[in-house]
Image (cartoon, rainbow, N blue to C red):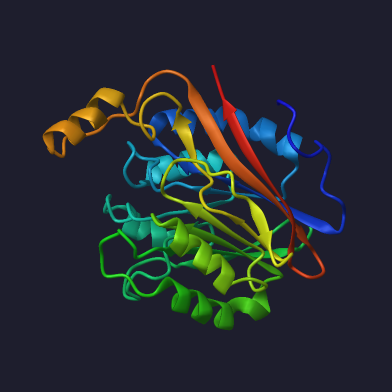
Amino acid sequence: MPTASFSNIPAPSEYFRLMFVGDIVARPGRRVIADWLPKARHYYNPEVVIANGENAAGGFGLDVRTAEEIFRSSVDVITLGNHVWDRKEIFSLLEREKARLVRPANYPPDNPGTGMTIWTGHSGFRLGVMNLIGRVFIPGALDCPFLAADRLIEEHSPHYDALFVDMHAEATSEKKALAWHLAGRAAAVIGTHTHTQTADEVIIEGKTAYLSDVGMTGPHEGIIGFAQEEVVERFITGRNSRLEPAKGRTQINAVVVDICRESGEARGIYRINEVTK
């Protein structure tokens, strides 16, 4: 493991450490996470690993086989996004794996699955994991993510010690607005969806860790994980042709957040951006 911006020792005993892995894209993403994550868990010492898996099956959606593959790679909880409904078998999987698989909470309530789970670490610390989706530039019958977050916090806050939120959205302003809306109520609000890691990590009001986008885990070459020529052709022709994952090197984008066990507030946030051969 290369040198990180913090020490490769366990978090201080008064801190709970989580790792969040950016959008896993297709087979290259699944392969690199299977190889990298067991070593990373030893190096960074997170108590829980969360990963966004909405692009894990061929770049679009998640299915049973790919979900199981990600869990075997030592991911504890998978979050999703706007491709959640791309593969119909996800319906039964969402119901069966409610403890480890969450989809955006602000889809209409009659959809399968849950937008919130509570993960208990080996120390007994209870982390609430919430998944939301933005409405700016994202089509669909979506409820307000801000109000959905309020409802879930009111319902579940007695049952967790700190809250982590994956905000899957296009607009940076919408992501940061949610972080300010939840400042002091969530330990971390981390953005996903754009596949491009941002460098704006901050702890808002000394309580809530924020990053506009954690980035992507998968093909490093190409355009947001997909073959360059196919993406360029889309822009030139306007045809919505099928996209394949890019070949070549892979990358891992992730973030580590340290949370005070007593207050449930963030005390540190650290980006990970590695490229494999």
When asked about the image quadrant of residue 189, the answer is: bottom right
The picture places residue 40, in percent across and down from the top left corner, at 68, 34
When asked about the image quadrant of residue 129, the answer is: bottom right
The picture places residue 63, in percent across and down from the top left corner, at 35, 46
Q: Is 95 placed above or below 215 here?
A: below
When asked about the image quadrant of residue 195, the answer is: top left
Left of 198 or right of it: where is 2?
right
Left of 216 or right of it: where is 134?
left
Left of 241 or right of it: where is 199?
right
Report whether residue 194 is seen: yes
What residue appears at the point 64 percent right and 42 percent down from the top-left corner?
Answer: 271
Q: Which quadrant would the C terminus be assigned to in this image?
A: top right
Viewer-closest of 106 and 170 = 170
The picture places residue 162, in percent across and down from the top left corner, at 68, 67
Viewer-closest of 241 and 72 = 241
What residue appears at the point 12 percent right and 33 percent down from the top-left corner?
Answer: 237
Report whether residue 97 is seen: no
Q: Which quadrant would the N terminus be assigned to in this image?
A: top right
Viewer-closest of 12 and 88 = 12
Q: Is 67 placed above or below 217 here?
A: below
Viewer-closest of 165 and 236 = 236
